[in-house]
Amino acid sequence: MADAFLALMVPMIIFMVIVAPIWLVLHYRSKSQANKSLGAEEQEILDQLARLATKMDDRLSALEKILETEDPKWKEKAQ
């Protein structure tokens, strides 16, 4: 009886001391890496925002050109 108990106890101790901690670390590391990446919907929103920012930059450049032709010293006046 004691031999059977000892035969089960040694592998359990080895599992709990070596295998289980490594398993847990790898499991939670993979979970955190999965949470760091963007989902498809989030990536689409980010792309849309980037396109809107580019359009806004183009519009600002056009407005600056218009102001430059009407009043070359408009930047000095604005500051």
Image (tube, rainbow, N blue to C red):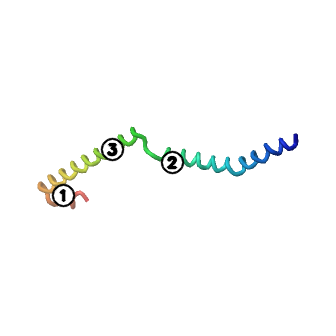
The label nearer to you, 2 versus 3, is 2
Which residue of the protein is positioned furthest toward the top in this rendering? 41
Q: Which mark is residue 47?
A: 3
Number of numbered discs: 3
What residue is rendered at 36% in x and 44% in y?
A: 46
Real-space Cα distance between discs 3 and 1?
34 Å
Q: Is residue 36 left or right of residue 13?
A: left
Given residues 36 and 18, the one toward you in this image is 18
Real-space Cα distance between discs 1 and 2?
50 Å
User: Which residue was labeled with disc 2?
Assistant: 33
Badge 3, how many Cα within 10 Å: few under 14, some, many 20+? few
Whichever of callouts 3 and 1 sits on the residue coming sooner in the sequence is: 3
User: Which residue was labeled with disc 1?
Assistant: 74
What residue is rendered at 63% in x and 46% in y?
A: 24
Image coords of residue 72 (percent x, y): 14, 59
What residue is rendered at 16% in x and 54% in y?
A: 65
**On the rendered image, what quadrant is the C terminus found in?**
bottom left
Q: Regarding mark 2 in the picture, which secondary structure is present there?
A: helix
Given residues 43 and 25, the one toward you in this image is 25
Which residue of the protein is positioned furthest toward the right in this rendering? 1
